[in-house]
Amino acid sequence: MSDAVRRVQSGSPWEASFGFARAVAAGDRVLVAGTSSFKGSVLYGEGDPYEQARVAFTSALEAIAEFGLGPESVLRTRMYLTHARDVEAVGRAHKELFGAVRPAATMLVVEGFVDPRILVEVELEAFRGAVDS
């Protein structure tokens, strides 16, 4: 793999105002920044942690698709929730997308996000090299 660093933007208004990229590839690794269920100025799944997790993970997967990668390339996921009561719903969304891959995963309960309607934010780390099953 190339040692060049490549960045992908998603168009989130926070990317420009905070100065970050949705995903960064360096060597064999692709890192996806914290991703919520916002698409543009629309929050999908307001009040529904399962739907927010599904949309957020789908957006994160779209970011790694820019590098030719899919769910099978995901090594690690991180899930940040505002309520412990949402663990099962978010876990269900994770399993639907990554159950066959079984990446290393972390789930944390946090105090809140930049928009109080956000219930879930996710991160991914993916590998661009050969993947063994």
Image: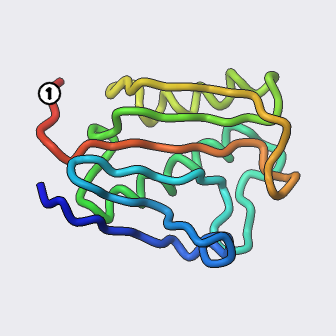
Q: Which is more toward the observer, 121 or 62?
A: 121
Q: Is residue 75 above or below residue 37?
A: above
Point 58% across, 43% down: residue: 122
Q: Which is more toward the observer, 39 or 15?
A: 15
Q: Is residue 17 left or right of residue 27?
A: right
Crowd around label 1: few <14 · some 14–19 · many ≥20 (10 Å)? few
Q: Which residue is mark 1?
A: 132
Which of the 4 image quadrants contains residue 130? top left
Q: Which is more toward the observer, 27 or 42?
A: 27
Q: Quadrant of the N terminus?
A: bottom left
Residue furthest toward the right? 116
The spot of residue 80 in percent (x, y) is 67, 36
The spot of residue 5 in percent (x, y) is 29, 65
Point 63% across, 42% down: residue: 53
- Colour scheme used in the picture? rainbow
Q: Is residue 119 left or right of residue 34?
A: right
Point 48% across, 34% down: residue: 77
